[in-house]
Image (tube, rainbow, N blue to C red):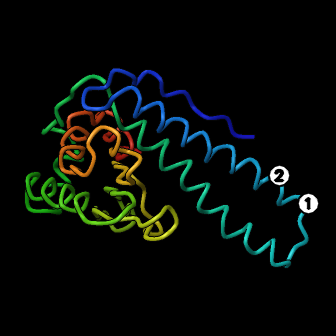
């Protein structure tokens, strides 16, 4: 059984109302509950049945929804932190994208695209390459073999309560709340 992690330390986060965050935490808790329900049901369902097939498809949605939200909340901080320019990730970003500014522009532009989903700075360790990717839904668009370093939720529930249709304002608030230490830790691992 999975237990939802507590992210209440993010309450008071600049650019994110407590109401928005509490709603988001509740939504995340629903993913955790559904992962548990589907895992339990998978133990009793007839293998190969149509219900089995649908359960298998749905599990990836709920599992990724749970974990992407955890990665998202964990790369936020109430302490405004600059991205350390002397860090290995900063250097890797500048090398891959030509400059930090080019990467940031690309990441933000990906987040401003129409549609729902996630924006992820992903690292493929085997090739040593970084990618800014768009993940449509939770289970469509993940690059196999990559590790998520920075995760931004761009489903409407992440910003509509505070920003309405002003997604760019949400992206800016997100940018100011990034826990760069956590992102660096993910890269180092």
> Viewed as shown, does residue 8 lie left or right of 46?
left
Q: Which residue is located at x 24 percent, y 65 percent?
A: 113
How many marks the image carries: the answer is 2
Q: Quadrant of residue 96?
A: bottom left
Q: Label 2 neighbourhood size at 10 Å, few (<14), some (14-19), many (20+)?
A: few
How far separated are the C-alphas under marks 1 and 2? 7 Å
> Viewed as shown, does residue 99 lie left or right of 113?
left
Q: Which residue is located at x 25 percent, y 26 percent?
A: 14
Estimate the x, y position of residue 140 in percent, counting from the top left. Answer: 48, 70
Quarter of the figure with the N terminus: top right
Q: Secondary structure at mark 2?
A: helix
Q: Quadrant of residue 103?
A: bottom left
Q: Is residue 47 above or below residue 103?
A: below
Which mark, by number, is residue 109? Answer: none
Estimate the x, y position of residue 70 in percent, counting from the top left. Answer: 49, 41
Estimate the x, y position of residue 10 in percent, counting from the top left. Answer: 39, 25
Residue nearest the viewer, comparing 14 with 5 = 14
Q: Is residue 119 above or below residue 142?
A: above
Label 2: which residue? 40
Label 1: which residue? 44
Q: Are marks 1 and 2 in contact (CB under 8 Å)?
A: yes
Q: Quadrant of residue 134?
A: bottom left
Q: Is residue 66 above or below residue 21?
A: below
Q: Which residue is located at x 33 percent, y 57 percent?
A: 119
Q: Which residue is located at x 34 percent, y 49 percent?
A: 152
Quarter of the figure with the C terminus: top left
> Viewed as shown, does residue 100 lie left or right of 167?
left
């Amino acid at each position: 059984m999975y237990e939802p992690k507590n992210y209440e330390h993010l309450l008071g986060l600049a650019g994110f109302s407590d109401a928005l965050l509490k709603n988001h935490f509740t939504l995340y808790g629903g993913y955790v509950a559904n992962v548990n329900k589907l895992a339990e049901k998978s133990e009793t369902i007839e293998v190969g049945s149509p219900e089995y097939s649908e359960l298998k498809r749905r599990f990836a949605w709920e599992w990724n929804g749970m974990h992407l939200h955890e990665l998202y909340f964990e790369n936020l901080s109430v302490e405004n932190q600059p991205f350390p320019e002397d860090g290995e990730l900063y250097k890797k970003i500048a090398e891959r994208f030509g400059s930090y500014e080019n990467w940031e522009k690309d990441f933000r532009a990906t987040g401003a695209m129409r549609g729902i989903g996630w924006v992820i700075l992903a690292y493929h360790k085997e090739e040593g390459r970084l990618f800014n990717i768009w993940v449509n839904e939770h289970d469509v668009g993940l690059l196999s073999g990559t590790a998520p370093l920075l995760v931004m939720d761009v489903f409407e529930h992440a910003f509509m309560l505070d920003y309405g249709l002003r997604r760019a304002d949400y992206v800016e608030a997100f940018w100011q709340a990034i826990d760069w230490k956590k992102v660096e830790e993910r890269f180092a691992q």
